[in-house]
Image: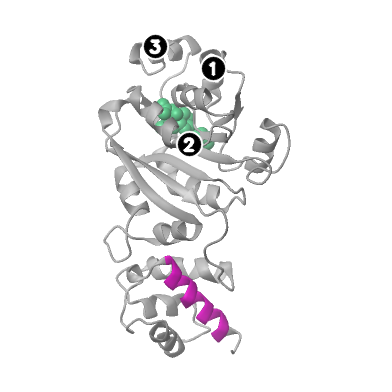
Amino acid sequence: MNLCNPRVIRELMAEAGIKFRRDLGQNFLIDPAVPDMIAEIASPSPDQVILEIGPGIGCLTSALAERYRRVVAVEIDRGLIPVLEKTLAEYENVTVVNGDCMTVDLADLLSEAAGGGVPGVDFPVSVAANLPYYITTPILLRLLESGVRFSHVTVMVQKEVADRLAAEPGSKDYGAITAVLGYFGTVERCFTVSPGSFLPPPAVSSAVVRIDLYPEPAFSPLSEKTFFDTIHASFEQRRKTLVNALSARFSDVGKEKLSEIVVSCGFSADVRGERLGTGDFVKLSDAIVRARNGV
Ligand code: SAM
């Protein structure tokens, strides 16, 4: 069955009595080269368990199942489950779960599908997905903060979001999510995909990015919470200088001390947050922790 053929997709959906749900970001791939390319770069090793978010009617799922040990696909739309049972019937290494990727217990799900063990420790896991665009950043943050040690996260997102994820400090696209991602791994922008590759076509272009997660933490902030708070505070009001933005969040430290801290980290007192890389935010947040502790 050619799952990228628009006629096949329409027939499968008509048989199941369902329609495309815009509210769930349902734009299905119709260019067969794209799921193959995503599956190809998702991991260098075939013994990985792959978590797919939003399998739709299963075109990427089948490309992943051909290459990797096991695929666990989480789909929120109950109406698509009977379709997936049909389109993926020939693959014994696929587990389809009806659920919301924002609330399911990812570690439990992966462990159960793999026959036990801790995902990322006892067996390697990665993520591959054509993400629903209404919820891209929350999904990425949930994956990274889930505690599951994924090796790679390969996702299709809106082109503008891909630009932001892979931006360099100081560029116009650099933001809180870029600095947060830098804590967990490195980001590579892989290729772009035009709206005509989807049914229905989205209003914007898309791009695939791959995040290679550090196997061991590359940074060790004194307080992870203060580190993330520092990043979010620095980008909340982009027009403000870093010192003013931090003063709004860390009023207990005080503007004068914060100004001293920014300068002691090697920046001018009027620098803006978008100039700082992930390592700079670690230095800055460590200095804030020390100032709070009176050290
Ligand atoms: N993988 C398919 C493809 O590439 O053709 C479909 C991708 S479509 C852009 C996004 C999919 O994510 C849809 O099937 C949608 O129902 C599903 N989805 C949306 N929100 C979700 C959520 N919170 N949890 C799991 N799946 C979700």
Q: Does the rendering let one see residue 28?
A: yes
**Residue 232's spot in the image, x, y percent?**
45, 65
Residue lying at 36% horizontally and 60% vertically, measured from the top left: 175
Using the rendered view, name the quadrant where residue 109 is placed. top right
Residue that carries the numbered disc 1 in the rendered image: 88
Residue 47 is drawn in which quadrant?
top right
How far apart are labels 3 and 1 at the CA level? Answer: 14 Å
Give the camera-side residue of 28 and 281.
281
Identity, as a three-letter code, of the amino acid under mark 3: Val
Q: Which mark is residue 168?
A: none
Q: CA distance from mark 2 to mark 3?
A: 23 Å
Left or right: where 92 falls relative to 282: right
| Residue type pointed to by label 2 | Ala
Q: Earlier in the sequence, mark 3 or mark 1?
A: 3
Tell me where the magenta segment starts and ends, as one range: 278-291
Does dot 1 land on a helix, a strand or a loop? loop
Q: Which residue is mark 3?
A: 8
Q: Amino acid at mark 1?
A: Leu
What residue did someone put label 2 on? 128
Give yes or no for residue 90 being in the magenta stretch: no
The alpha-carbon separation of the residues under discs 2 and 1 comes to 17 Å
